[in-house]
Image (cartoon, grey):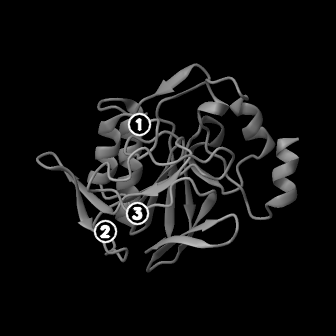
Amino acid sequence: AWCQWVKDRVSLPVQLVPGNHEAQDGDGEWAKYAACLPDQWGVTDGTYASGQWVSDRGPATIISITPGLTLDGQTRTYERGTPEREWLKDRIDAAKARGDWVIVDMHMPCLTLGAHGCASAKSLTDMLIGKKVDVILAGHDHIYARTHQVQYDDARGVTVADSDGSYAAGAGSVQVIVGNGGHNARALVSPVAGVWAAGAPGSTTGWLRLDVTEDSIRARHVTVAGSLTDEWA
């Protein structure tokens, strides 16, 4: 029923990313979701059904990962020294070498203003920001919130590279929590949790649109009512 509900409403190719509700929390079986709406983007590395894959989408390389989730009896952490972390680093480096925009998506983030707090390895977030992944997408917390463009080094940790909403390509990362598309959107736990946090509408129900060209990424958060609440590029 859920699969048909999506197909009746979404005409563009849909790609799913597993979360805890489709994995270990017992609200559904990820394999059934993946079979219901299978790979439609042409995964070129990894496997869609495993939740760890790469898709080349024009000027962008999209890399999907599953930190903190148990799928088919396997839990990937992306901690230092794990094979999945080395796999991820290699794919980021290859995409950067091609001159692609790099977008990494996952369900459970660490850097968040939501109630769940750090739900995946902190060292994973540090690595993604250290490698200047252009956009990091996550869910889990039922909010919309994002960072400024941030950078990372071992001496200072996560710091702000730019905060004006118009960012220089390759200067850092923007992480966005987009967990407010379904029911029970929640308020931010602490809107000023860190200097890295940009303004956010919090519990507004909506979605994020990314328009990617060879020269730019433009992001717009739109509520279900159609109003624009956040925009950056």
Decide: is 179 above or below 76. Answer: below
Residue visible at 84% across and 54% down in the picture: 7
Q: Are marks 2 and 1 in contact (CB under 8 Å)?
A: no
Residue beneath the point at 49% across and 39% down: 108
Q: Is residue 70 left or right of residue 78?
A: right
Q: Looking at numbered disc 2 in the image, what kind of residue is underneath it?
A: Gly
Instruction: Point out the residue furthest to the bottom here.
Output: 215
Determine whether the residue tagged by mark 3 lies in a helix, strand or loop: loop
C-alpha distance separating marks 3 and 2: 22 Å
Count residues near mark 3 (Cα–Cα under 10 Å), then give few for <14, some for 14-19, many for 20+.
some
Q: Position of residue 176 (x, y in %)?
A: 46, 56
Q: Earlier in the sequence, mark 3 or mark 2?
A: 2
The secondary element bearing badge 1 is classed as: loop
Q: Amino acid at mark 3?
A: Gly
Reading the image, the residue beneath label 3 is: 199
Residue matched to label 2:
170
User: Which residue is disc 1 drawn over?
Assistant: 117
Which of discs 1 and 3 lies nearer the camera? The answer is 3
Instruction: Report the residue that reaches farthest toward the left.
Output: 155
**In-front residue for pair 103/53:** 103
* Residue 15 visible in the snapshot: yes
- For the residue pair 182 and 88, the one nearer the viewer reads as 182
> How far apart, in angstroms, are the residues tagged by discs 1 and 3?
18 Å
